[in-house]
Image (spheres, rainbow, N blue to C red):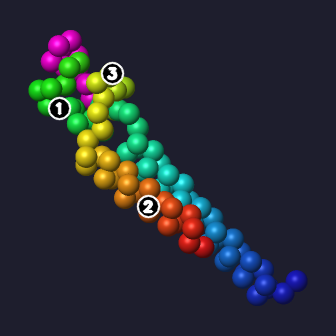
Amino acid sequence: MDADKIFDAMSKMSSKVHRLDKIREQRKIVNRWSAEVCGNCVFWMTSNCKPEKVHKQFKSMSSIACSDFTRGDFTKKQITQETAKLVQMETTP
């Protein structure tokens, strides 16, 4: 085999793996923003947080969301932006 062909094939494979890694990382970002956890709720760390106000439960950013979970506008915007980045990454070779 020709060494140049081997190196060209390895370069193409490396680029593909690198691209797939970036897509995987972007999916993780989208999933983090989309998760129904306290940190993505409009009531988190406010006086309107029922678990903390009524039940005296401490809620951290990654706590499971309660039944009053409401996604904030900022979180919605981030989901839209990060999803758009993901779509672009997946469609661009």
The residue shown at (73%, 81%) is 7
Q: Residue at x 40, y 42 (%)?
A: 34
Q: Residue at x 41, y 38 (%)?
A: 35
Asked whether 57 falls inside the magenta stretch, the response is: yes
Q: How many neighbours does mark 3 have within 10 angstroms: few (below 14), some (14-19), or many (20 or more)?
A: few
Q: Main secondary structure of the magenta part?
A: loop
Residue under label 3: 67
Q: Is residue 15 left or right of residue 76?
A: right
Which region is colored magenta?
Answer: 52-60
User: Residue placed farthest to the top in the image?
Assistant: 55
**Residue type beneath disc 2:** Ala
Residue 8 horizontal/vertical position (percent): 72, 82
- Tag shown at residue 84: 2
**Secondary structure type for disc 1:** loop
Q: Earlier in the sequence, mark 2 or mark 3?
A: 3
The 10 Å Cα crowd at callout 2, few under 14, some 14 to 19, many 20 or more, is: few
Residue at mark 1? 45
